[in-house]
Image (cartoon, coloured by chain):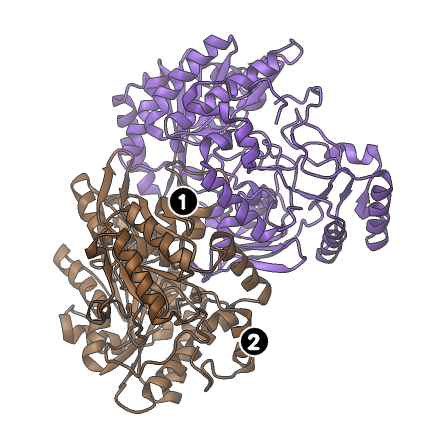
Chain colours: A brown, B purple
Amino acid sequence: MSAQPQTPKDPLYPDPHPTVSPQAKADLIKALEQALQADTVLHEEEDLRPYECDGLSAYRRLPLAVIIPHDLDQARQALAICRERGIPITARGAGTGLSGGALPFPNGVLMSLARFNEIIDLDPVKRLARVQPGVRNLAISEAAAPHGLYYAPDPSSQIACSIGGNVAENSGGVHCLKYGLTVHNVVAVKMLTIEGDLVTLGSEALDSPGYDLLALIHGSEGMLGIIVEVTVRLLPRPERAQVLMAAFDNPQVAGEAVAALIGQGIIPGGLEMMDNDAIRAAEDFVHAGYPVDAAAILLCELDGTDAEVSEQVHEVRELLLGAGATEVRTATDEAERMRFWAGRKAAFPAVGRISPDYYCMDGTIPRRQLGKVLGGIADLSKAYGLRVANVFHAGDGNLHPLILFDANQPGELEKAEELGGQILELCVEVGGTITGEHGVGIEKINQMCVQFQPAELTQFHAVKAAFDPQGLLNPGKAVPTLHRCAEFGAMHVHRGQLPFPDLPRF
Amino acid sequence: MSAQPQTPKDPLYPDPHPTVSPQAKADLIKALEQALQADTVLHEEEDLRPYECDGLSAYRRLPLAVIIPHDLDQARQALAICRERGIPITARGAGTGLSGGALPFPNGVLMSLARFNEIIDLDPVKRLARVQPGVRNLAISEAAAPHGLYYAPDPSSQIACSIGGNVAENSGGVHCLKYGLTVHNVVAVKMLTIEGDLVTLGSEALDSPGYDLLALIHGSEGMLGIIVEVTVRLLPRPERAQVLMAAFDNPQVAGEAVAALIGQGIIPGGLEMMDNDAIRAAEDFVHAGYPVDAAAILLCELDGTDAEVSEQVHEVRELLLGAGATEVRTATDEAERMRFWAGRKAAFPAVGRISPDYYCMDGTIPRRQLGKVLGGIADLSKAYGLRVANVFHAGDGNLHPLILFDANQPGELEKAEELGGQILELCVEVGGTITGEHGVGIEKINQMCVQFQPAELTQFHAVKAAFDPQGLLNPGKAVPTLHRCAEFGAMHVHRGQLPFPDLPRF
C-alpha cells in the first residue's frame, strides 16, 4: 500500500481494550519511567509517530507509549507493569510487516525489540547462529559468509526486517520453495511469557519431546509471547547457482509450465513469475534484460553441486520449451544472473514508479491452479477497471498481485481493496489460503472467517488463552472473534458477495 | 524391551483417574453397546488382552473397554459417552509405539483406529495422499509406487505402524536426516476434539494462516484430539541410490567421521552406524557381508540424480578414508545395496537372538558429540556389567543403544533401566534430548523433568487444557505434573543421581 496518508479508519472494530484515562496513562508512564532508564520509554507524540504503523501504512495509530528495552530484565519489568494494569502490549521488530501485525493500539503499549540486536553466537561446525530478535535477516547471512554458510529464508525486505519479526510472521522469500519458510530454518526460540517467565522452545536436536511449541510460535504475530532469542540453522552456500529466464506469450501457459516443471520432480532454488506489466515496470527501472513484449516470464534458479546444476539446466530448458516457452535464456555469467534477479527483486518499487499507489496482495493456491487463477485475476482486473501487475513465487503457488490505483481519486482505495478481497476469495475457492508469507494481522482478519470454521477459530482462541489468559499480547490481531465472523457472515465465499461490505471497517 | 511378561508395576503413579465402580462400568458398556454396533465394543477380558500394551511391553494394563469405531460418527458418539462420564480415552494406532503412548488406563477406554484404514485419495499431480489414520505407513508408499512416488518417513516398524500413530509420535526413520520427520511430510490433519468437533489443521498450501496447530498435533501422543484423517506429501523416487559401507577400528573415530561428513555439506539419504556387537549379531542373522572384526561400520546412502550421486560417492569415499576408515566398500549392484541395508534393518531382532532380552533406548545428541557419548556409553556398560549394542541414526545424532540383559535374572531389568536412564542423562548433559523418534509416553516421563523447567511444563499443561479442559485425552502421558517433578527433584542431571530411584515407579 502507498505511503500516502489515508483517512484513519478504525482497523480494530470493536476496540477490545478499555479506554485508558489521562490519569491512568500518566500513572503508567510514571511507573515505566521509574522502573526503566529514561531512554527506554517514549510517550511524546513526536517520539511515538515513527511507530504509528508497520508496512501496512494505510492504518496508523499512536500507542500510549513505546518501550525500547535494553535487556531482558527491562522487558520483563515493562511486561509486569502493563500486566498489572491490564494494558495490551504489541511487540515490534523492524516494522516491515505488510499485514499490520505491529500496528499499535491507542490504549496499549508498543514494545520495540530494536535494541536486542546482538549475534550472540555463530557456530560454523554446528551450523547454528544464536541471535537476538532485533538482528536483521541479512546480517545473519553476512556474519555467516566467511564460513561459506548462509541463512536461507530471504524475504524481499531482508536488508531491513528482523529475525524476531520473521518468526512472528513465519516469513518466506524467493528460496522457500526449496529451503522452507522461517519455521523450517529455526531450531529454538526463547520467549518471555506474559507472566515474565523465560521459556525455551525447541532445541538444537532434530526433535524435541513435549508439544511442538516452537512451531506454534511461528506465525503467531506476537500473540503468545515476546520473542527474545532465536537460534537459526545455517546452510552451506551451494557450489553453483544458475538462472534460466523463459518468455511466454500467454501467462496461463507460463502457469502450466510451472506445474509441469515441479511435476517432473525438479525443485528449483527459486521459481518466480512476472507478467507483462511487472516486466515492463522492472525493465524500465533496472534494465534487467527482460523481453518487454513477453506476456510473462519465468525465472528459474537451479542450485547445488556443479554436476547437478549442469544436468538440471539442460533438463529444465527442454522442459520449458516443450511447455510452450517462446524463448529460454541461460544467464551467461554471474553478472547476468544478478541482473535477472535484480529485476525481480525491484519489481515492487518498479511498479510504484508507474502508479501513484499499489496494493500488494498475498495469497497461496495449489500450483496446478496457477493458470486458472491468472485468468480469473485478468477478468477481475477488467471488471474493476484497475490494472493488476502480477509477481509470483510461482513454484510454491504464492501470489503477489499488485493492484494499481490512485488514492487521490475518491473511491479508488475502496475499489482496490474490494478487488483484493475478490482475489483472496478466488484463492480459497480453488483450495488455497488467504496468506502466503505476509501474515494475517489486521489486513486479512475478515478473510479468516472464510478460511476457517467456528470449531477451528474456537480452538485458536483456546490456544491463545493458554498462553495469555488476560488477552494482553497483541489482542484482536490475526484470529477474528466468532462475533466478528457472525457479523461478516455475508462474506462467505460461496455466496459470491463482496468481502468488504459497507459496514464499519473491521 | 522383550515380550517376556514382567511383574506389573504401576506406570501411572499417582493414578490420575477416579476408580470406576463395577456398576458404573456396566452402565458405560451398556451405553456404548446401545449407541454402537455390537462388534465395535469389546469388554471381555480375553478380548481386551491384545490391547493391554503397545511396543513397551514391560507395562500391561487392561482398559474398561476397547472401542473400534467403523466411522467418524461412531467415534464421535463414543467420545460423547466417555466425556459425559468423565472417562479417559486413549487412542491407539497399530500399537507399535515404543514408549507406552498407547498403554490403556484401567479406569479408561481404549479407542482403536484400526478400522479407519482407507486410502481416500492419492493425487500424483498434487503429490498428496489423503488417508485414514489406520493406514499402514508402508501401504502409502506401495499405493504411490505406480506413480514413481513414495512417502519418505520410514520407521523400522513401517510394515506394521499406522500413519495416525506416526503423527501422534512424530516418527522418524532412516531417511529423516534428509527428508525430515513425520511433521515435515504431513500437510493436513483432521481430528475430532474431545467435544466431538471435527477440525482441519493445515492445508494443501505451503503455509496456513492462524496458529500452527498442525505442528502442535505432531508428537502430541493422543493428548489433544483423535486423529481421523492425514494428508501426506509424496516424493518422487530418487533416480538413483547408492550405498557405501565404511569400516572403522574405533567407534569414536566413526563418530567423528560422521561429523566431518555433514560438516562438508553432504546430506546423505541415510547415515547409519553400528558397533561391533550389532555388526556381529546382524551378520550372523542375515549375512549382510559386514566385516565382523570392525569396531564400527557406517552405512551411507546417497540418493538423487545420476550425476549427483556419482559425484558424491567419490567425494564421500575420499572423505571417509581421510577420516580414518580402514575400508570403504561401495555396493556393486542393487542386490548388494539391499543386503547392506538388510543387516541394519534386522539389527534389533538380530540382537534379540543373542540376548534373552534387550532394552532399546532412544536419545538425540548434537552430532559433534557422537565420539564422546560413544565413549561414555562404553564406560557405563562396563560399570553396570551389561553389554550395550549400538545402532544409531548417526547422521541426525539419534542414538538407539540396545541394552542386553536377562529379565529372568533378578534385578537385571532394574539395572538395565538404570543404565538406560544414565545414557539419557548423558544425552541431556551434552546438549541433546531424551527422545529422538519414539516419543515420551510413560517410558521417559520422569526424564521430562530433567529436560524442561517448570515454566515450560506449565505452558505444556496450559496447551493441553486449551484442547482438553477436563483432561480426558490420554492424561498423564508425555508431560509430567509439577508434583511428579518435585517428587523426583533428586533426579536432576547435574547432581549425578540415578534417574530411577527406588520409589514407586512413576
Q: Is residue B265 left or right of residue B388?
A: left
**Residue A265, position in %: x, y?**
40, 53
| Mark 2 surroundings: few (<14), some (14-19) or many (≥20) residues within 10 A | few
| Picture quarter with the N terminus of chain A | bottom left
Tags 2 and 1 both on a single chain? yes
Nearer-the-camera pick, B57 or B124: B57
| Residue A197's disc number | 1
Q: Quick check: A350 above or below A84?
A: below
At 33% from the left and 54% from the top, the residue drawn is A78
**Residue B443, position in %: x, y?**
58, 29
At 44% from the left and 79% from the top, the residue drawn is A422
Q: Secondary structure at mark 1?
A: loop
Q: Is residue B46 left or right of residue B306?
A: right
Q: Quick check: A94 above or below A504?
A: above
Q: Secondary structure at mark 2?
A: helix
| Picture quarter with the C terminus of chain A | bottom left
Q: Which residue is mark 2?
A: A486
At 61% from the left and 20% from the top, the residue drawn is B503
The chain to which mark 2 is attached is A
Which quarter of the figure has residue B223?
top right
Which quarter of the figure has residue A248?
bottom left
The chain to which mark 1 is attached is A
Nearer-the-camera pick, A243 or A466: A466
Nearer-the-camera pick, A113 or A277: A113
